[in-house]
Image: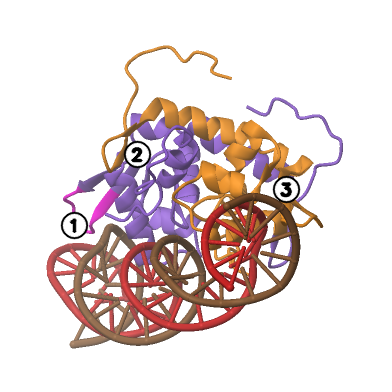
Chain colours: A purple, B orange, C red, D brown
Amino acid sequence: MSRPRAKLIDYFPGCPVEATLSFLDGKWKGVILHHLLEEGTLRFNELRRRIPAVTQRMLTKQLRELEEAGLVSRTVHAVVPPRVDYDLTPLGKTLEPVISALRLWGSEHVMCGDDQVSAVMPPQQKVRSAA
Amino acid sequence: MSRPRAKLIDYFPGCPVEATLSFLDGKWKGVILHHLLEEGTLRFNELRRRIPAVTQRMLTKQLRELEEAGLVSRTVHAVVPPRVDYDLTPLGKTLEPVISALRLWGSEHVMCGDDQVSAVMPPQQKVRSAA
DNA sequence: ATCGACGGTATCCATTTTGATACTATATGC
DNA sequence: GCATATAGTATCAAAATGGATACCGTCGAT
């Protein structure tokens, strides 16, 4: 219910980019998808531990939005310490090339200083076909 | 200035994805980059016309952020009706594979209803190498 | 003299997003 | 009985984002 992006854009010829971005919106969706792609099924607190800076509320929200978008599945096991598994749906898995492209660009061009992030041209190294 | 994303993330092993996303953040950066990639140098109002839904303030803001990030260059011509050219920097151009991946996924998986956007699995069609 | 185009700024306001904190329920371990 | 773990929800407040509107200065056209 909150998709400010692409929602009121009446300009859709050039919009698939923005449309895709709207699914990755929010502060944590990228990381969540990344972990789910890398590690497969994860429980709520497993994700939390992998993303220390996220709060419970935020993680819940982002997961719900991913679920609503059909990218992530949520499986509740009716066991006694509650247990909920999160996994990518087939649709979610199709995002792999996108996440890979993001990750590749990030790892080649983004330098992480102490508390800031900046993009730089990589030294003339050839881009290996990093799958 | 304002980079809530990735700013306070002390978890950087798995973060290139999020780092990249932080550069595409904001409602219009994706479209701006898309147009600049497609059409090369554009003036302020040329961009505006290509993105009817953006306000002057927002376009300015997003362009400034892209400039600050080193992805876009801003050239002021000291002529009499002011003239400002925006173009991708070499660094900005390296985002092409990313934008392409986003565009490809968007065009294959995102269906645009009247006023909402949803992702779907494409019917088993093979992915043509849509450059 | 006024209007419009250009490329913005400044101001104000509404919405959205995020964070902090406290709270829930059940079961196990102590 | 109390703490812990699980997977959250509720509430409040702050911050960030975005939109509307008005304004700036200069030039050419009317």
**Magenta-drawn segment:** A77-84
Which of the 4 image quadrants contains residue A56?
Answer: bottom left
Residue B89 location (% of width, % of height): 76, 44
Which residue is labeled 1 in the image?
A80
- Give the residue type that dot 2 points to: Leu
The residue depicted at 33 percent of the width and 58 percent of the height is: A61
Q: Are marks 3 and 2 on the same chain?
A: no
- Which of these two is toward me, D2 or A83? A83
What element does badge 2 sit on? loop
The residue depicted at 54 percent of the width and 63 percent of the height is: B57
- Give the residue type that dot 1 points to: Val
Give the CA separation, mark 3 to mark 2.
Answer: 39 Å
The reply, left or right, for residue C26 in relation to residue B36 is left
Residue A68 location (% of width, % of height): 27, 46
Mark 2 or 1 closer to N-term?
2
- Which of these two is toward me, D11 or A87? D11
Q: Chain ID for label 1?
A: A
Residue A83 location (% of width, % of height): 26, 52
What element does badge 1 sit on? loop
Q: Does residue B72 show up?
A: no
